[in-house]
Image (cartoon, rainbow, N blue to C red):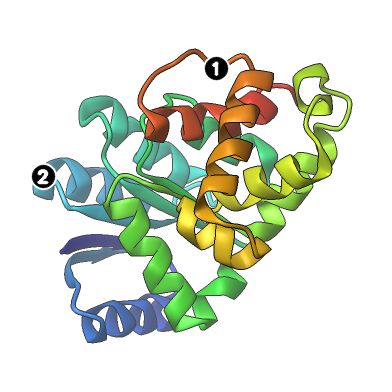
Amino acid sequence: MRVVLAEDLYLLRDGLSRMLTAHGFEVVAAVESGPELLEALLGMRPDVAVVDVRLPPTQTDEGLQAALAARREVPGLPVLVLSQHVEQLYARELLADGAGGVGYLLKDRVFNAEQFVDAVRRVAGGGMAMDPDVIAKLLARSDRDAPMSRLTPREREVLELMAEGRSNSAIGQRLYLSESAVGKHTASIFGKLDLAQSDDDNRRVLAVLAYLNGM
């Protein structure tokens, strides 16, 4: 699986490259600036991009903007964003096209190799990997949103794990529910959020967007 990595801190960039390589990924480019990232993504068309939000030359959201520009040219290009802090605006921008294959992790998660690699694989496979802290903050901010207020506490728990990219089976294991029970909760979430019948993977993305767009 081919990866383009963007991180301006050399030690972290080198460490991530080594970690990914050790887990069977091929790091085809490891860059340190926004312009280099955009060039690498468009030129190499990797299976997944792992991107620090803040890159030179602006040190604001250069990495995120380069990744979004690449996704406009290559729809559905899988992108896993790394950030030091929870930024709702960044998460909303990343998910805005509803195409899936996106992730948002806090950098602290990088030090858990198993969790980080699992997130990279899920995003590369077209799924979603949202940091639990990001989801918790987004859900807290959306308490006043009418569609979200329709959800039961259990449905909110299911939605939180869904947004992390967990399958129904994995959600069931975490919440000690049968897979069929999770399926019923998921169907109820889709209904309460007024999500029309379509591919379930797409509706999972839309379910997350439902509360992001209400902030």
The kind of residue on which mark 1 rests is: Leu
Q: Compared with residue 60, is residue 97 higher up or lower down, i.e. above or below?
A: above
Identify the residue under disc 1. 195
Residue at (68% x, 45% y) in the render: 87
Task: Answer few, some or many: residues within 10 Å of disc 1's Cα (few below 14, many 20 plus, some between 14 and 19).
Answer: some
Q: Quadrant of the N terminus?
A: bottom left
The one of 146 and 107 positioned closer to us in this rendering = 146
Q: Classify mark 2: helix, strand or loop.
A: helix
> x, y percentage for residue 118?
39, 68
Question: Residue drawn at (28%, 34%), measured in percent from left and top?
Answer: 76
Measure how far apart labels 2 and 1 are at the Cα level. Answer: 36 Å
Q: Quadrant of residue 72?
A: top left
- Sequence-earlier tag: 2 or 1: 2
Q: How many marks?
A: 2
Where's residue 46, x and y in %? 17, 52
Give the residue number, with chain letter if any, for mark 2.
43
> Taking 155 as reference, is 210 left or right?
left
Residue type for callout 2: Gly
**100 or 70: nearer the eye?**
100
Point 81% across, 24% down: residue: 150
